[in-house]
Amino acid sequence: MKVLVADDDFGSRLVAKAAVEQSGHECIVAADGNSAWELYRQHRPQVVVTDLMMPGLNGLELCRAIRSAEEDSYTYLVLVTSKDSREDVVAGMQAGADDYVAKPLDPFALHTRLLVAQRVTSLHTDLARYRAALAEQARTDPLTKLHNRLKLSEDLEQLHHRCARYGTDYSLAICDVDNFKRYNDLYGHQAGDLALQSVAASLAAQGRESDGIYRFGGEEFLFLLPGQTVSGAEARLARALEAVRELGIAHSGNPSGTLTLSAGLSAFVPGHRVSSERLLKEADMALYAAKSAGRNRVEVAPEVRQHTRS
C-alpha cells in the first residue's frame, strides 16, 4: 500500500515512516496539513496517518477534505493524538477517521492498524470493481453487446448539452433491419438473433472511436456522431449500410435477397439547434420515409437537408 504520514514533529515522522516501511509499505511524508493535502491529491494513497494538531490544515480538517474528495476509492484514515482523550477520538471519528493511535507513537500499534487498513481498502477496491462491472452490465445490450437505451439517454444528454453550450455539431441516426419480422418468420428467432449480432458487429467496426452505436430496440440501432455535419453523417451511414450488405446474409423475404438496413438521419447543426427529443423524432420520421421509398437507403430529415454542408 501507499501510506501518507502527516506530522509537524520531525521525530514522530521518522518513527511513523520507519514503522510503515518495516510493515512492507511505501511511505510519503508531509510536515504540515496543507502539504499533506497536496500530496494526497497527487498520489491518492490508500492510507493516511495524520497528526491531530499541525500547521495549515489540522488533522480533523484533513480528514474532512479527504472524505469529500473520495469517489470510487476509499482511504483509510488513522488519527494520531498527543492526548489519548475521548474527546479527541470522537472528534476524529466524526471527521471521518477510521481509527486512532496516541503519541508517543508505538510502531506495533501502527503496524496493527495497517493490517486492518489493508483488509478494509482491499474490500473497498473489490466493491468498486463490482459496482463498475454492474454499471457496465446495466448499460449493455446482452444480445449484441452494444450499449443500450439507458446508456444512450446518458450519452445523448451529455453530448447535446456540450454541443449546445459550445456551438458544435452532432448527427443522430436510427437504423432498422429491413423486413426483419419476415426474416424471423422464414428462418426462426435463433437465426434472427445471430443476424442481429452480425449486424451489430459490422456497425461497431465502422467509423470513428468517438461514434456511439446503440441497440435502440428490437431490430433498431442508433448512431450518435459527434462533430459530424449532415453530409458527413450521410456518407458515414452509407458506408455502414454497404458493410451490412457485404455480410451477404441471405434473406429471401427481402427484395435484394440479402439482409439490408434503412436509416433516417437528423442533426444538430447551425440553423437547426433543436432539442434532442426533436432530433429523435425527426430521425424516426426519416427512417419511415426510407422504408416508404423502397428500403436499403439513407434518408435525411427534410428539416435539416437544407443545412447540409461539407
Image (cartoon, grey):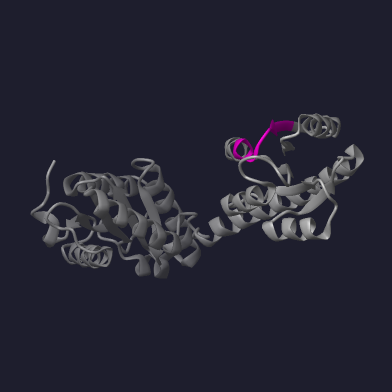
Q: Is residue 113 visible?
A: yes
Residue 73: give x, y in percent of width and height.
63, 49
Q: Is residue 33 magenta?
A: yes
At a point 26% along the width and 53% down the height, the residue shown is 165
Residue farthest toward the left in the current orientation of the protein:
306
Q: Nearer the viewer, residue 167 or 96?
A: 96
At a point 27% along the width and 63% down the height, the residue shown is 276
Q: On the rendered image, what quadrant is the C terminus found in? A: top left
Residue 192: give x, y in percent of width and height.
44, 62
Q: Is residue 260 visible?
A: no
Range drawn in magenta = 27-36
- In the displayed structure, does residue 46 sit left or right of residue 267? right
Q: Nearer the viewer, residue 278 or 37?
A: 37
- In the displayed structure, does residue 113 sit left or right of residue 208? right
Is residue 209 depicted above or below 11 in this figure? below
At a point 40% along the width and 52% down the height, the residue shown is 199
Q: On the rendered image, what quadrant is the N terminus found in? A: top right
Q: How many marks?
A: 0
Residue 149: quadrant of the picture: bottom left
At a point 23% along the width and 67% down the height, the residue shown is 278
Residue 211: give x, y in percent of width and height.
35, 46
Residue 239: give x, y in percent of width and height.
27, 44
Is residue 30 depicted above or below 137 in this figure? above
Q: Nearer the viewer, residue 112 or 126?
A: 112
Q: Is residue 273 magenta?
A: no
Residue 223: quadrant of the picture: bottom left
Q: Nearer the viewer, residue 299 or 191?
A: 299
